[in-house]
Amino acid sequence: MTVGARIEHLVTSGTFSLDGGTWDVDNNVWIIGDENEAVVIDAAHDAEAIVEALGARTLRAIVCTHAHNDHIDAAPELAARTGAQILLHGDDLPLWKQTHPDRMPDGDLTDGQVLTVAGIELTVLHTPGHAPGAVCLYAPSLTALFSGDTLFAGGPGATGRSYSDFPTIVGSIRDRLLTLPGDTVVHTGHGETTTIAAEAPHLQDWIDRGF
């Protein structure tokens, strides 16, 4: 990790729409990098606020943890203003097309892929359940996991709508996330941060119930 590499956090506000309903939401936008370059995880709602936070830095990529509209609605504008590529797991293309039918992502995220920015390695973990192509990004040098809507402070992400499945998300968390060091800080798609150790007891309850 290079000197000055850091995690920055924005909260942006807008709406989430799916299955005929619309809800007001606040989203976490994560910027990882140093004074020269960065990646953005989840370009939500407000491209202008993200551009301002980036300043003169080069944006290397716009990484989408999944394709619900509240996590991707600002991605095309941010890409147009910065020249950065939009990266999404291919299994979430059906959801992406609901929001951006005329603008496809620029590249695929795949399980085990490593993205590097400012000397920080971000490993892609495919964690379906909240959405088919949901991913988390693990940065061991920062003791950090960027979980999107797969894992929150208090438990798994929601699975009550189209393209989601509760046993699948519990399996993803059990197999891909609970294996990480307990002190890993979980930077979520909404709400407060948590740690793997703090969430493990809650999740073990679901696992013990057969999910």
Image: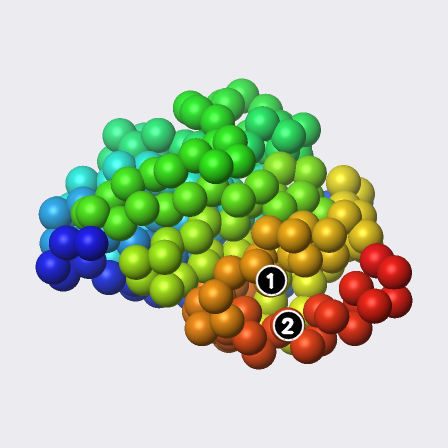
- In the rendered structure, the answer to whether residue 135 lies left or right of residue 200 reads left
x and y, in percent, of residue 207 in the image: 79, 64
Element at label 2:
helix
Q: Quadrant of residue 15?
A: bottom right
The quarter in which the N terminus is drawn is: bottom left
- Name the residue: 44% across, 69% down: 185
- In the rendered structure, the answer to whether residue 47 lies left or right of residue 112 reads left
Element at label 1:
loop
- In the rendered structure, the answer to whether residue 156 lies left or right of residue 208 reads left
- Name the residue: 38% across, 38% down: 114
Q: CA distance from mark 1 to mark 2?
A: 7 Å
Name the foreground residue: 151 vs 58.
Answer: 151
Amino acid type, residue under disc 2 in the picture: Ala
Q: Are marks 1 and 2 in contact (CB under 8 Å)?
A: yes
Q: Which residue is mark 1?
A: 178
x and y, in percent, of residue 66 in the image: 57, 43
Q: Quadrant of residue 90?
A: top right
Q: Which residue is mark 2?
A: 200
x and y, in percent, of residue 88 in the image: 50, 33
